[in-house]
Image (spheres, rainbow, N blue to C red):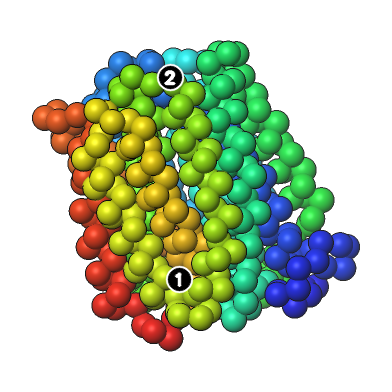
């Protein structure tokens, strides 16, 4: 079924679960999310006309998505993975349709559906990766998968904002819906198979979501792996939401925010550097240094702020360079630490980093923005990431 994971060959009828398979699916999923990634915060600001209310809106849908993510194993128990993935793609299509309405209700509903759909496809894809890619090959497969998605994240955010400005709220969402439909068609063409030991009675044994969380927390390596993913995702959530707002409130055009996001994603090509670096000096060193770079860049972004928006933009891109390194290899500690028989239950818990990285910062930022300008959010994230750099250096095993 599977060719050696390190061999970079296109998927065929005999080999449909190699590096290229997951790279192509991740590319299309990324493109779907990228078209409205730069639009979400701008549209929310246009509707609400308040930084603080944008944060409060984030709290609303992030808390809902978090609950849905924790309940994902219930879905996997009753449905095969291919149907879960299909539901995820469908939700992203429906979410874009709701966002196109340009109403507060549509903004909330659409963002929830988009994020729940992304959780379904993301967890499912990660489970397929765990079943098909050897642990020793992850330093090759993960950077390659990320680098292949660069095109989506370079083209998507700017295109989405440009379409929003020139074609209205419907235009970027139509692009996202077409991309999601292509993703779904490609997935069904590839016909990835569920492991035989998990069929036919669903994909998972009985479980208790709270017990899964407790089991996850009980394992130090999984806790640290989650912390790495959470801190990195907090930076990106802050970057995507408040980076464009910082540019707008600094007196720049709305498209500048989209350009900054697209340029930041061009840095994902650095994954080809981080992979070999991790092999040479170790995953721990690379991740710790990347967090240190994010911390310094974020603090400088907050310092220059709206007074010097172009300098702040350069600092944001510097932070994105560090975050790209963690994107490329930051998932390896989890993929190497999770136990085979716990993969599905633990992956659902691990995925909560994405929802909590939207929820918790939104709560903190909503309070901070009552007393300070938008620059404060970058100072907060800079201080937080500094702590994560120290924890990684101190506790991530050298052998990881």
Residue at 63% across, 59% down: 145
Q: Where does residue 313 sit, x and y in percent of width and height? A: 38, 37
> What residue is shown with label 1?
334
Q: Where does residue 174 sit, x and y in percent of width and height? A: 65, 24
> What residue is shown with label 2?
253
**Picture quarter with the C terminus:** bottom left
Circle nearer the N terminus (2, 1): 2
Above or below — where is 23 with respect to 262?
A: below
Work out which residue is located at the far left of the displayed protein and give it: 371
Q: Where does residue 202 sit, x and y in percent of width and height? A: 62, 62
Classify residue 286 by image quadrant: bottom left
**Picture quarter with the N terminus:** bottom right
- Foreground mark, 2 or 1, reads 2
Q: Going by the image, does 382 lie left or right of 127?
A: left
Residue at 36% across, 32% down: 310
Label 2's element?
loop
Above or below — where is 49 with respect to 39?
A: above
Residue at 53% across, 38% down: 262
| Badge 1: residue crowd in 10 Å (few <14, some 14–19, many ≥20) | many
Q: Nearer the viewer, residue 347 or 314?
A: 314
Classify residue 395 by image quadrant: bottom left
Q: Nearer the viewer, residue 206 or 49?
A: 49
Q: Going by the image, does 147 lie left or right of 322?
A: right
């Amino acid at each position: 079924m599977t060719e050696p994971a390190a061999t970079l060959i296109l998927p065929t009828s005999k080999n449909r679960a190699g590096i290229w398979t997951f790279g192509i699916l991740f590319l299309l999923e990324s493109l779907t999310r990228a078209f409205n990634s730069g639009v979400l915060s701008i549209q929310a600001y246009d509707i609400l006309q308040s930084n603080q209310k944008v944060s409060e809106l984030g709290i609303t849908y992030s808390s809902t998505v978090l609950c849905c993510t924790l309940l994902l194993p219930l879905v996997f128990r009753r449905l095969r993975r291919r149907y879960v993935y299909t539901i995820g793609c469908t939700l992203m299509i429906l979410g874009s349709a709701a966002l196109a309405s340009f109403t507060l209700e549509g903004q909330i509903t659409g963002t929830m559906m988009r994020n729940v759909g992304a959780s379904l496809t993301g967890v499912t894809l990660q489970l397929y990766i765990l079943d098909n890619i050897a642990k020793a090959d992850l330093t090759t497969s993960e950077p390659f998968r990320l680098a292949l998605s660069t095109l989506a994240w370079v083209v998507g955010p700017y295109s989405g904002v440009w379409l929003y400005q020139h074609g209205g709220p419907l235009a970027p969402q139509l692009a996202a819906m077409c991309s999601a439909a292509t993703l779904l068609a490609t997935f069904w063409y590839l016909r990835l198979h569920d492991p035989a030991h998990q069929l036919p009675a669903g994909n998972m044994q009985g479980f208790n979501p709270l017990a899964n969380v407790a089991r996850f927390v009980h394992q130090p390596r999984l806790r640290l792996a989650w912390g790495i993913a959470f801190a990195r995702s907090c930076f990106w959530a802050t970057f995507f939401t408040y980076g464009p707002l910082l540019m707008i409130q600094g007196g720049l055009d709305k498209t500048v925010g989209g350009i900054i996001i697209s340029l930041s994603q061009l840095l994902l090509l650095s994954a080809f550097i981080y992979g070999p670096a991790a092999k040479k000096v170790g995953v721990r060193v690379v991740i710790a240094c990347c967090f240190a770079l994010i911390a310094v860049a974020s603090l400088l972004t907050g310092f220059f702020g709206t007074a010097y928006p172009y300098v702040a933009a350069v600092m944001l891109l510097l932070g994105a360079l560090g975050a790209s390194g963690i994107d490329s290899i930051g998932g390896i500690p989890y993929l190497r630490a999770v136990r085979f028989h716990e993969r599905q239950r633990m992956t659902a818990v691990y995925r909560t980093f994405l929802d909590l990285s939207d929820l918790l910062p939104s709560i903190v930022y909503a309070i901070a923005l009552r007393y300070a300008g938008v620059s404060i959010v970058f100072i907060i994230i800079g201080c937080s990431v500094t702590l994560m750099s120290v924890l990684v250096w101190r506790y991530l095993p050298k052998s990881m």
